[in-house]
Image (tube, rainbow, N blue to C red):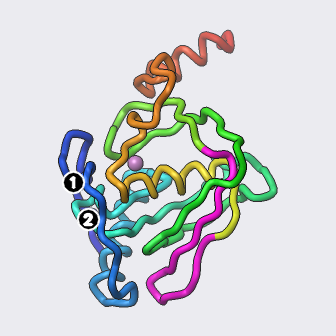
Amino acid sequence: MAILKIARMGHPILLQRAAPVPDPGAAEIRRLVDDMLDTMEDASGAGLAAPQVHVPLRIFVFRAPAERVTGDADDRQVGNTVVINPVLEAIGEDVRLRWEGCLSIPGLRAAVPRAWRVRYSGVDCDGAPVGGEVSGFHAGVVQHEYDHLDGILYPMRMTDFSRFGFVEELARAQMQQAGA
Ligand code: NI
């Protein structure tokens, strides 16, 4: 159990395409995944991909906290989830701008276009299948983490740079707008 160092935007590992995991059940993969979960929780993140901790393998972890999910039928609270060698496809044409952040881009948030519904699959450390058809926050976090495995960071997906800012400033602006 360890907290791993998180690479920040500008580090070349974040732009690499990660390699498939030959043996998801290997002891060193389980150790890495345990450390990734500890690191995600320590950083109060909703997701973390292996390249963000300097390991260029196709692995990510995520969770969908109750306060972040939309309440859509396919977007319910999800605990810590491990996805190794994922496959991802968008369902339908519905793309929406949704706010997201990234542990590799600390202090900033942006509205990023994401497919509202996706289907994904992969395995966990026991080789058991994970995934399904999901929407909303769950779909967004999976797309964000999957992108990390292909060397894509969320600014590379953005279309409206007026909705990009520091978390503190965005929160202040929102409070003023709400008349608080
Ligand atoms: Ni990220």
Residue at position x 37%, y 74% in the image: 33
Task: Find disc 2 in the rendering and name its residue.
Answer: 56
Give the magenta-colored segment's residue range.
115-131
Which residue reaches farthest front?
A: 93
Instruction: State the image coordinates of residue 156 (x, y, percent, origin top left).
Output: 39, 36
- The amino acid type, in three-letter code, at marker 1 is Ile
Element at badge 1? helix
What secondary structure prevails in the magenta region? strand
Instruction: State whether label 1 is within 8 Å of ligand 1.
Output: no
User: Would residue 122 be counted in the magenta stretch?
Assistant: yes
Which residue reaches farthest right?
A: 73
Compared to 20, does 47 lie above or below?
A: above
Whether residues under marks 1 and 2 lie with C-beta atoms below 8 angstroms apart, the answer is yes
Residue at position x 57%, y 72% in the image: 121
Instruction: State the image coordinates of residue 90 (x, y, percent, origin top left).
Output: 62, 54
Element at badge 2? loop
Residue at position x 48%, y 71% in the image: 83
Instruction: State the image coordinates of residue 4 (x, y, percent, origin top left).
Output: 25, 62
Quarter of the image that includes the N terminus: bottom left
- The amino acid type, in three-letter code, at marker 2 is Pro
| Crowd tier of the residue under label 2, counting other residues whose Cα lies within 10 Å: few below 14, some 14–19, many 20 or above | many
Quarter of the image that includes the C terminus: top right
What's the CA distance linking mark 1 and mark 2?
7 Å
Q: Nearer the viewer, residue 76 or 115?
A: 115
Residue at position x 51%, y 80% in the image: 123
Task: Find disc 1 in the rendering and name its residue.
Answer: 13
Q: Nearer the viewer, residue 40 or 104?
A: 104
- Mark before the other along the chain sequence, 1 or 2: 1
